[in-house]
Image (cartoon, grey):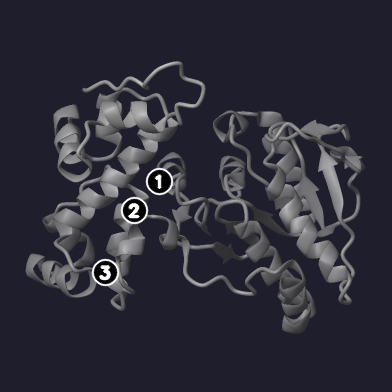
Amino acid sequence: MTVLAFPGVRLLDVTGPIEVFTTANEFGARYRVRIVSEDGAEVITSAGTRLGADLSVTEVSEPSDVLVIPGGANWETLIKDDALLDVIRRLNEKSRCTASVCTGSFLLAAAGLLNGRRAATHWRHSQQLASRFPSVRVRPDAIFVRDGQMLTSAGVSAGIDLSLSLVEEHYGAEVARSVAKDMVVFMQRPGGQSQFSVHSQVSHVHHEMLRGLLDAVATNPGANHTVAAMARRAGISIRHVTRLFHEEVGTTPARYVEQVRLEAAQMLLETGDDPLPVVARRTGFGSPESLRRAFVRHLGVTPGAFRATFRTTGAGAKGPVATTSS
């Protein structure tokens, strides 16, 4: 089992899978865990801790049952690192299966290893994975996805879920169950990533076609999601789409789309510096004025006030945190 480490890697993305596989050894498994860095040197993780490597990429000669590609907060920079992407391709060629954790899926996609495949990533980043790599079939609600020899998982702790599934595949359910009990984690986590997003407001959807429409909205809120467009994609009538939303989602298509877009806009305002026109365009509101109206109607604040309030806790401020309206 090989884990790739690089500067800025997320610590739990590395240690979570390692803990699963080494704990499995206590119950009869025979994993040999190796941390590999490009040059064999230690790296500094996103947490600021030092992480040692066992060997360099050039020293990897034996095939590995599992290659783990962790993620990092600076994934937008990492996917432009041609040397790192080449390292991933070389390691993948020597591995029986390759698994990513969280934003590690962006690295696999940038390396061309997810073309035409289904994949998962953290729900906050699923829209960006789908838009940057349109050949990847993103599953925004999945905890982890397997497509051939490639496995991808959602945010950080989902790497533990994925690793447990591999232990079960290699050594059976009893060993995986023992590891889960020892680590006090779910053998199989209930629910998908929907429990962390606006999908949590939607009861279980039985109609597969409707689930596809909901996933399309979550994956790319900025796309055309009028009821007419949804009906065309599904190959059914507008009346049928409207009826399914009422029966299984409990709201209209337009209200559901607005809820998803609102959540996407909140995420961008909390985590990014894009100006409001860009946020409005990316999330499907079209204009800052439409974005403003939706925020005031649902949240009682303007987008500018929301950003000023939720980008900081206000700790250390000498006076009240100022808000702006825009």
Comes first in the chain, label 1 or label 3: 1
- Give left or right: position of 74 versus 25: left
Helix, strand, or loop for circle 1? helix
State the CA–CA distance, disc 3 to disc 2. 13 Å
Please name whichever residue, 310 or 60, is drawn nearer the observer in this view of the structure: 310
Q: Is residue 16 visible?
A: yes
Q: Which residue is mark 1?
A: 127
State the CA–CA distance, disc 1 to disc 3. 19 Å
Q: Is residue 140 visible?
A: no
Q: Position of residue 14 (x, y in %)?
A: 74, 48
Please name whichever residue, 62 or 204, is drawn nearer the observer in this view of the structure: 204
Q: Which residue is mark 3?
A: 210
Q: Residue at x 90, y 60 (%)?
A: 32
Q: Position of residue 23 (x, y in %)?
A: 83, 66
Q: Residue furthest front?
A: 319
In the rendered structure, are the residues bearing label 1 and label 2 in contact, judged by CB atoms less than 8 Å apart?
Answer: yes
Comes first in the chain, label 3 or label 2: 3
Residue 65 location, quadrant: bottom right
Q: Residue at x 23, y 73 (%)?
A: 248
Helix, strand, or loop for circle 3? helix
Q: Residues within 10 Å of mark 2 (few under 14, many from 20)?
A: many
Q: Position of residue 251 (x, y in %)?
A: 16, 64
172 is higher (above) or lower (below) than 314: below
Q: Which residue is mark 2?
A: 218
Comes first in the chain, label 1 or label 2: 1
Q: Residue at x 29, y 54 (%)?
A: 217
